[in-house]
Amino acid sequence: MHEDEAAFRRIYERTAPRLRAYLHLAVRDSALADDVLQEAYYRLLRADMNDAAIGQVRSYLYKTARTLLADHGRRVGRERRRQRRWNSSVSESPRHDLTLDMERLFARLSQREQTLLWLAYVEGASHREIAASLGMQANSVRVVLYRARKRLAGILEGHGWGPEEAS
């Protein structure tokens, strides 16, 4: 096996499962998530990142994936608005199905908020890595992440998943 191929395989194995999970959660469409994942790695192969650290590669992949999602969103904007109207009309009864509820509630966050929370709490990315992925200042991440957490907490509490449920 060629050395570049082995290096790419190691990067893919370290980053693809979580990136795919993020994409699936963001778009709730396995085929689209797979298409975006494939295109992100294709672009990584074309990028000159041979000497980049894994954190830089991860940031590049998330930034590329977000761009691809935004492009897709623009192409199918009308369909997304129709889908959002359908999602908002789904029964608001709390706890009827945790998985569907969490996907539906997470979808109420903006794409940026979803990405912030995913990178911070699933990927365990540092504020600097998050900033690179989202094209923002590192010192802004703490504040924006706090607001995203607070917004998600409000959404969850509004559907019966408040702190009092922990006991």
Image (tube, helix red, strand yellow):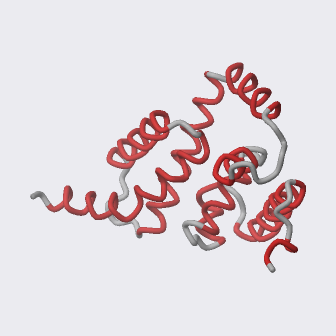
Image coordinates for residue 51, horizontal then vertical, percent? 34, 66
Check the image and report above or below for 26 versus 151: above
- Is 7 left, or right, of 32 in this rendering? left
- Is 54 left, or right, of 137 in this rendering? left
- Is 25 left, or right, of 89 in this rendering? left
**Residue sitting at x 26%, y 58%:** 9
**Residue sitting at x 12%, y 57%:** 2
The residue lying furthest to the bottom in this view is 167
Image coordinates for residue 89, horizontal then vertical, percent? 82, 30
- Among the 4 quarters of the image, the one containing residue 120: bottom right
| Closer-to-camera residue (55/165) | 165
**Residue sitting at x 64%, y 30%:** 73
- Report the number of numbered marks: 0
**Residue sitting at x 72%, y 44%:** 104
Check the image and report above or below for 73 versus 42: above
The residue lying furthest to the front in this view is 96
Image coordinates for residue 150, horizontal then vertical, percent? 85, 64
Check the image and report above or below for 151 versus 83: below
Image coordinates for residue 79, horizontal then vertical, percent? 68, 21
- Is 127 left, or right, of 89 in this rendering? left
The residue lying furthest to the left in this view is 1
- Among the 4 quarters of the image, the one containing residue 123: bottom right
Q: Quadrant of the N terminus?
A: bottom left
Q: Quadrant of the C terminus?
A: bottom right
The residue lying furthest to the top in this view is 78
